[in-house]
Image (tube, rainbow, N blue to C red):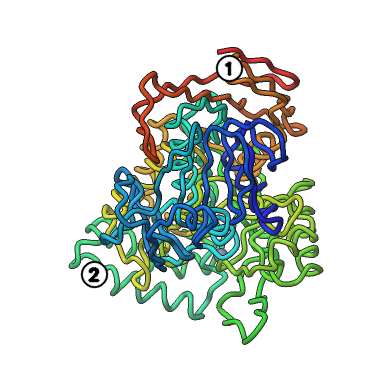
Amino acid sequence: MIGVQALEAEDRVIAEFFELFKIPWEFYRSGVPYDLVICSSRNMEQNSARVIVLYSSEATQFDDKTRGKLGSHSNVQLSYFGNLIPIYGRCLSFAGEANPLQIANGCGSAAREIQSGSQTIVRIGYDLFQEVGHLLQTGQPAVFGRFPTLELHIDYLRNLIVGHGITLFEIPPTPHGYNFTVCLTHDVDHFGIQNHCCDHTMLGFLGRAVFGSVVDLLRGKKAIRHIAANWWAVLSLPGVYLGIQKDFWQQLDRYVEIEKGLRSTFFILPQSDNPGRRVVGRVSKRRGAKYNLSQLRDQLLTLRQAGCEIGLHGIDAWVDEEKGRQELERIRDEINGLEVGVRMHWLYLDETSPQLLEKAGFSYDSTVGYNETVGYRAGTTQVFKPLNVGWLLELPMHVMDTALFYPAYMNLSPNEPSAIVDELVTNTQRFGGVLTVNWHDRSIAPERLWNGFYTGLLGNLRKRRAWFATAGDATAWFRKRRETVFESVSAEAGAAQLRVAPNPKDRALPGLKLRVCKPSSHPTNGAAGDRAEKQILDFPLENPGFVNVTI
Ligand SMILES: [Zn+2]
């Protein structure tokens, strides 16, 4: 068992951290014999644990006692075995230590180990739970978006525990039988160019399709066939407006064809001509949708028959509980369903939004992501619970088409995103969790024609044994993992007893698994251990109820 001794103010963030790093643990109680104690309080209580992991960015009693030479730094990145971890608070360095956890740019070690009798003390120079709280509440700036920072904190701590000879039982964020989870999502912002007669959107389309396509061709961003498709779309516009030709921006059912049973999630705006509001300042009129829910009815039916999910693309729900309730009811009426998730239009969100969304009745939100880049705003691949709510879960969004291709954002050519997105896929495969992709409704239509990269990405993900889940199913699986608890664990006996939560009502979800990380017979001393030096055993936890596992 692992005991956690911390400041009371950190209780919520610690509880959430150990939902993401799901191992047997408890808040420290005096007199209980722990294998390892994690301490973030400067006044560490004497205890008998074999290993103490002491996180703090300030000098501690322990440092005074051992007279360590300290340096204090801000805005640093830590490196260990090729990984880089951005630190957002302060970080101490320990002079003269050859620890694998190094502050980049040659500022020295950020950790050190002291042997005190039979006890090993690992002293780490930053505040883990403050870092985790910052990631979950404020998030990372876009410049560090590509770092799965929270997963790296977990990975470092896991290696440290196992590297010190302690067997670790864990329920990883990966469904049994799969390597990771993928959520394909689509924000429906336009649905039909016929709703945009002679407005800014239509004129923008004409400019980009006729002239922008040629510029893109010269820059190698589009091929001749794309120019032909765009010009043909322009020529067909009169027929579209007269209603005698198919509207080439109505592409929802084409996603069903492209995805071939992968069950994606469509976020639908609840109302037309409402740009919504901000807390301060005015909102551009362009934020308002031009389509009505009634126009989508046939396609929504097709989507639901294909197993897809319909959620709300919220307008004011992020800032107004009552408006959120009304927006939710509009979608609920349309889909005749009880559970509705939300992603805010233009990713509007502030620190009070999770509470407002929860009070309005949403089951999950999927707004935490970047407009301008791809990656991990909250530093995690996992579905998490925002710190100020009781029930609502957050499905972070990682890859958005407009971030990749818009000239004002990453401005990439059609094939350029492959390496960047591959890195994110590989991270999800390594750490588990979800890769959430957002491809807008008209992104596979003229003039964007971003379908080539999207279909290539689907092919790549299919090969990697991903569980393709709707946003609702992915969050339900994580809820089931959160509700599963360790009843007892005995590392010496190699046994664990767990109470596995049943599947949420009406949902057939993949099972969980228990992972046992056994130290090698030649444990590495040193702060981070060595990933190659441990044995990993997985056991399926497919049936609800009490489960006993012996290794
Ligand atoms: Zn939108």
Q: Is residue 256 visible?
A: no
Against 256, residue 6 (above or below) is: below
Where is residue 520, by image quadrant? Answer: top left
Q: Nearer the viewer, mark 2 or mark 1?
A: 1
Ligand 1 lies in quarter? bottom right
Against 84, residue 199 (above or below) is: below
**Residue 328: image tag:** none
Q: Earlier in the sequence, mark 2 or mark 1?
A: 2
Quadrant location, the N terminus? top right
In this figure, which residue is indicated by the disc labeled 2? Answer: 214
Nearer-the-camera pick, 329 or 362: 362
Q: Name the residue: 68% across, 38% down.
A: 26
Nearer-the-camera pick, 151 or 290: 151
Percent coordinates x, y for residue 40 in the rendering? 58, 52
Q: Are marks 2 and 1 in contact (CB under 8 Å)?
A: no
Q: Name the residue: 79% across, 54% down.
A: 333
Percent coordinates x, y for residue 131 in the rendering? 53, 58
Percent coordinates x, y for residue 155 in the rendering? 45, 41
Q: How many marks?
A: 2
Quadrant location, the C terminus? top right
Q: Name the residue: 32% across, 50% down.
A: 97
Q: Disc 1 on helix, strand or loop?
A: loop
Against 156, residue 110 (above or below) is: below
Amino acid type for the residue under numbered disc 2 = Val
Q: In the rendered view, does 178 fall on the left or right side of 283?
A: left
Q: In the rendered view, does 361 fall on the left or right side of 260?
A: right
In three-dimensional space, the C-alpha distance between marks 2 and 1, rounded to whole angstroms, equals 69 Å
In this figure, which residue is indicated by the disc labeled 1? Answer: 492
Amino acid type for the residue under numbered disc 1 = Glu
Q: In the rendered view, does 194 fall on the left or right side of 364?
A: left
